[in-house]
């Protein structure tokens, strides 16, 4: 049965989804608020499932479409709609070009059922018990988001700004410069180590990650056992050329028994295109006889050590780049401050409603981190605890939450950050600013400073008379929205004179009189 065209369709769709998803994380300003974003996000399984659990709306039904597609044709999600799967296919393709001549690409792998089903059971159990950490670490879309947003995006921004500088030097108007505020280096270690491991595993074992550690792949593998159409090997058509098994990146074709473990098949259709006898293909129930043909020739291959070394070197360079990215110098006080800022709770993004709910729904895909135009959203380490590993928090050391911005809630694919109208968002109190007089530059250095008051969008921070003609800040907590503009602007180091302590449950702030009159 001639079905070779299926692979061309698969490749076109997969590369399109990969390109859209990559642009979404890397160049958000271009496509983030267009329908293209919906095309890339709608079919992502875990984000869609979590979003559907919060809002019973069309935007959260992508996982149902994936399940229906799997019941018809198997795990086509893994080969076409999952950007991490396509990334693995690219690595496999490159490794194939570098492989030593006459070396066999892949061979049948025994199913690691105990590992994959135990991983799925652990992920589900932890999620039901209130911890999403396994989903954060293993969800394919979230891992791709961290690779693209945390690792690839700074390289893109550097190249973008480099081209702009070059054009400016020759007298041409270059593109508007982009800015990237580096997250803590430790948070970059997670996507970097995951990428290194994924590249190595893909080059050596093909799609083994998808069939052992990926909970989405395992779940869809269970569903695909009941698929209407499956890839089969008709016994009267197969001439035992072994090409299907050699090219099967999932290692699920057992040539001796002429059986395909369809629960592990990722529907890449490589086996169909390499079988010149047309002895393998989709069938509903019984194999379809097909004419025999000549054997296909052996494949080229090579060692992948050079590829892996190059990948590791690039990631090491990226780590260095992240430390030098985009923070501007700020004035320092002459006398170092000594009173520590006691931040009991981290500040969760507006629309999170409360930290417990946010921790239960956020998969740390970092789309909101890429979307934030002020760089205030940064990955957390243990600020939320272990269950909130890598989830975004507001880091006022590098930015602040603009009073005129509600972008993160508009883009969150899981519903962890609810979309809020700008007027509603402006009244949400994420936390409250606390002033420490002992740290204030007015008190310690006896010089005038009003940066916190000037930065406050709600008049929550205002100055009152101090002495010697100086004034000192005071916080009206009822008006404070916890945006962190005051903390970000405060010049004292190492501890700020004003800081925001988050609310575990977001509150409502009062509107200043001037705002109410508008």
Image: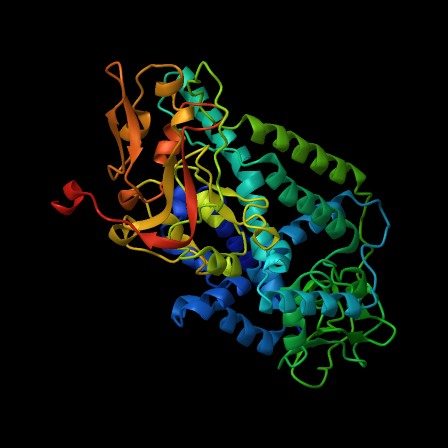
- Name of the residue lying farthest toward the bottom: 286
Q: Position of residue 110 (x, y in %)?
A: 83, 67
Q: Up-down: is 348 above or below 64?
A: above
How many circles with numbers are drawn on the protein? 0
Of 462 and 199, the residue lying toward us? 462
Image quarter of residue 290 = bottom right
Residue at x 73% of width, y 73% of height: 280
Task: Please state the horizontal and vertical placement of residue 126, each as a whole percent of the image.
Answer: 63, 65
- Residue 367 seen in render: yes
Residue at point 35% right, 57% down? Answer: 419
Q: Eyeballing the image, is 378 above or below 419?
A: above
Q: Is residue 98 left or right of residue 463?
A: right
> How did the renderer colour the structure?
rainbow
Q: Nearer the viewer, residue 278 or 231?
A: 231
| Residue that extends furthest to the left in the rendered view of this protein | 517
Q: Give the image location of residue 220, x and y in percent.
A: 63, 71
Q: Residue at x 67, y 75 (%)?
A: 222
Please identify the quarter of the rendering in which residue 164 is found. Answer: top left
Classify the position of the N terminus by image quarter: bottom right
- Residue 28: image location, x then y, percent: 43, 44
In the image, residue 36 sits, relative to residue 371, either above or below, namely below
Rendering quarter of residue 253: bottom right
Q: In the orientation shown, which residue stands out farthest toward the front?
A: 467
Foreground residue, 503 or 171? 503
Looking at the picture, tell me which residue is in the foreground, 100 or 112. 112
**Quadrant location, the C terminus:** top left
Residue 5 appears in the figure: no
């Amino acid at each position: 049965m001639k079905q070779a065209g299926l692979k061309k369709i698969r490749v076109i769709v997969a590369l399109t989804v990969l390109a859209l998803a990559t642009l979404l994380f890397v160049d958000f300003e271009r496509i983030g608020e267009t329908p293209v974003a919906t095309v890339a996000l709608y079919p992502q399984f875990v984000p869609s499932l979590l979003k559907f659990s919060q809002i019973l709306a069309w935007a959260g039904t992508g996982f149902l479409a994936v399940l229906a597609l799997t019941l018809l044709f198997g795990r086509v999600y893994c080969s076409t709609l999952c950007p991490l799967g396509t990334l693995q296919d690219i690595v496999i393709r490159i490794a194939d070009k570098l492989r030593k001549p006459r070396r066999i690409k892949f061979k049948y792998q025994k199913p690691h059922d105990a590992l994959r089903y135990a991983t799925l059971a652990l992920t589900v159990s932890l999620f039901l018990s209130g911890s999403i950490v396994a989903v954060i670490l293993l969800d394919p879309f979230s891992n791709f988001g961290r690779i693209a947003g945390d690792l690839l995006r700074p390289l893109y921004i550097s190249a973008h700004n480099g081209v702009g500088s070059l054009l400016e030097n020759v007298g041409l108007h270059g593109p508007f410069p982009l800015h990237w505020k580096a997250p803590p280096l430790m948070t970059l270690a997670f996507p970097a180590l995951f990428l290194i491991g994924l590249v190595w595993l893909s080059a050596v074992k093909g799609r083994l990650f998808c069939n052992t550690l990926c909970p989405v792949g395992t779940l869809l593998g269970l569903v695909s056992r009941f698929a209407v159409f499956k890839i089969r090997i008709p016994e009267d058509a197969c001439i035992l050329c072994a090409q299907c098994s050699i090219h099967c990146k999932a290692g699920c074709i057992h040539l001796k028994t002429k059986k395909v473990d369809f629960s592990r098949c990722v529907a890449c259709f490589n086996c169909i295109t390499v079988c010149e006898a047309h002895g393998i293909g989709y069938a509903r129930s019984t194999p379809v006889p097909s004419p025999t043909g000549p054997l296909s020739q052996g494949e080229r291959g090579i060692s992948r050590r050079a590829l892996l070394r190059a990948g590791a070197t690039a990631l090491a360079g990226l780590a260095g780049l992240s430390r030098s990215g985009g923070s501007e110098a700020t004035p320092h006080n002459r006398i170092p401050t000594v009173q520590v800022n006691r931040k009991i709770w981290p500040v969760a993004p507006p629309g999170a409603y409360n930290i417990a709910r946010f921790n239960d729904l956020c998969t740390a895909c970092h789309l909101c981190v890429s979307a934030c135009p002020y760089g205030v959203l940064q990955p957390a380490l243990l600020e939320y605890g272990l269950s909130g590993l890598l989830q975004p928090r507001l880091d006022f050391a590098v930015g602040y939450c603009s009073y005129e911005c509600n972008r993160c809630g508009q883009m969150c694919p899981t519903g962890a950050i609810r979309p809020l109208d700008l007027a509603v968002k402006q009244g949400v109190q994420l936390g409250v600013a606390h002033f420490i007089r002992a740290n204030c530059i007015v008190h310690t250095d006896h010089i005038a400073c009003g940066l916190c008051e000037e930065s406050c969008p709600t008049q929550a921070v205002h100055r009152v008379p101090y002495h010697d003609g100086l004034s000192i800040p005071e916080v009206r907590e009822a008006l404070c929205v916890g945006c962190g503009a005051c903390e970000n602007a405060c010049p004292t180091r190492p501890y700020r004179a004003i800081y925001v302590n988050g609310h575990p449950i977001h509150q409502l702030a009062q509107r200043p009189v001037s705002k109410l009159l508008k």
